[in-house]
Structure formats: C-alpha cells, structure tokens
Amino acid sequence: MPVSIRRLIVALTLSCALVAGATACSSSGSSAGKGTAAVAVAATPSPSTTAEKQRLSKTRFVANASLAAGATYQWIVKPWKAGKFKKGAKGRKLALIKAGVAGAFAYNRLKAASRNAKGDPTLSKAIGPLTAGIDALKSLPAKLRKGKSTDSTVGSFDDIINQVKDAGKSAGANVTDKVPSGAQLTHG
C-alpha cells in the first residue's frame, strides 16, 4: 500500500506543478483557464502570409477533389461500366451499398474542396459555378444505395467530378484520382 500513496503524492505534485506552470506562462496571469487557452492557440500552426494561405487552400482543394474523384471512379463509375448495377447482376446489392457510401464520401469531399477553393482567388472563380451542381449531389447517394435510376445518378457524379477536374486544371491545380482507403471512406 505505501507504493500507492507514493504514486499518489508524486502524481499530485506533478499535476500541481503543471497547473502552476501553465498559469505562470499565461499573458494575463489571472486564471488558469485563460493560460491554457493561450497555450492551445499558440500550439496550432497557421500560415502567416496571404500567399501561404492561398497555397495551402489550393493544396487542400487538390487533396479533397482527388479523393472524391478516386472514390467516384473506384466504387461508382467502374462497377457501373462493368454492369454491376443492373438487375440480376451478381453482387448487385453490395455494389450499390458501396456506391452509396462512396457517393456520400465524394459529396463530403467535394463540399470540402469547394470551401478550400474560396481561399484562392483563381480557384474561387473556377469552382464558383459548380457549387450548385455539387449541392445537387446531396440526394444521390441514397438513390444509389436503393438502386434507383443508377444510370442518371452515375452520370451526375461523373459529370460533376469531370467539371471539378477541369476547373482545377484551369486554375493550375491538377486533380488526379486518388482512391481512398476503407477507413477514409467510412470516416469521411
């Protein structure tokens, strides 16, 4: 039992020292809550110049749009071309479920890419007209999961992805297909 009490005393001493250190490091010094908030803000890196912000937004745009394009091709367009969405096709139900999940993922990543594009003036102008098309994709993953009007749904996804790729290319941000992992697909 004495070992437990020693550990308790050491833990209590260390935690008091950490709280006192955080309070001493704060700019106001009036409360520990303000000190820890200041430490948390200082710990998050942020770009300092407008050029860095624009470069990072373009990079994020490419990453998000590439994941959306890869998911759309791998789990929506490719199975559709192989005929897996047709009634009576072997593995149709699983292919439709995967396509629905991939469609939701692609919609999520395209929305993120659209937000990223707002940080770069050239991308913002190129992607601006596509936001309505991206918003229209919101209901399509449910249609894919249910197996309703798969031809038009797949066509809608493919068209929007190609338009985003073209818009990115015109703004100097080449979007290539990057197939997301299963964990990325399920966690968005």
Image (tube, helix red, strand yellow):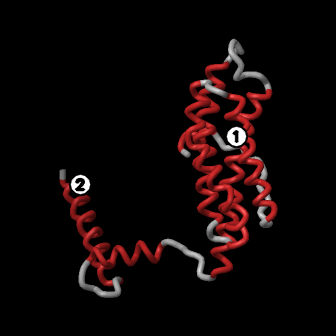
Q: Position of residue 63 (x, y in %)?
A: 68, 56
- Residue occupying image coordinates x 47% and y 73%: 43
Q: Is residue 39 above or below residue 164?
A: below
- Residue occupying image coordinates x 69% and y 64%: 59
Q: Position of residue 107 (x, y in %)?
A: 60, 46
How crowded is the residue under tag 2: few (<14 C-alpha within 10 Å), some, or many (20+)?
few
Q: Position of residue 23 (x, y in %)?
A: 29, 80
Q: Nearer the viewer, residue 8 or 154?
A: 154
Q: Is residue 180 above or below residue 3?
A: above
Q: Is residue 126 above or below residue 138?
A: below
Residues at marks 2 and 1, CA–CA distance in whole angstroms: 67 Å
Q: Position of residue 24 (x, y in %)?
A: 31, 84
Task: Tell me the kind of residue under disc 2.
Answer: Val
**Residue with the mark numbered 1:** 156
Q: Nearer the viewer, residue 97 or 143?
A: 143
User: Reading the chain from its start, which is encountered first: label 2 or label 1?
Assistant: 2
To which quarter of the image does residue 75 belong? top right
**Can the viewer see residue 125 in this picture?**
yes
Total marks in image = 2
To which quarter of the image does residue 56 belong? bottom right
In the drawing, does residue 15 fall left or right of residue 45? left
**Can the viewer see residue 75 in this picture?**
no
- Residue occupying image coordinates x 70% and y 14%: 90
Judged from the image, the secondary structure of the residue bearing numbered disc 1 is: helix
In the drawing, does residue 143 fall left or right of residue 160? left
How crowded is the residue under tag 1: few (<14 C-alpha within 10 Å), some, or many (20+)?
some
Judged from the image, the secondary structure of the residue bearing numbered disc 2 is: helix
**Residue with the mark numbered 2:** 3
- Residue occupying image coordinates x 62% and y 20%: 93
Task: Tell me the kind of residue under disc 1.
Answer: Ser
Q: Is residue 34 above or below residue 144?
A: below
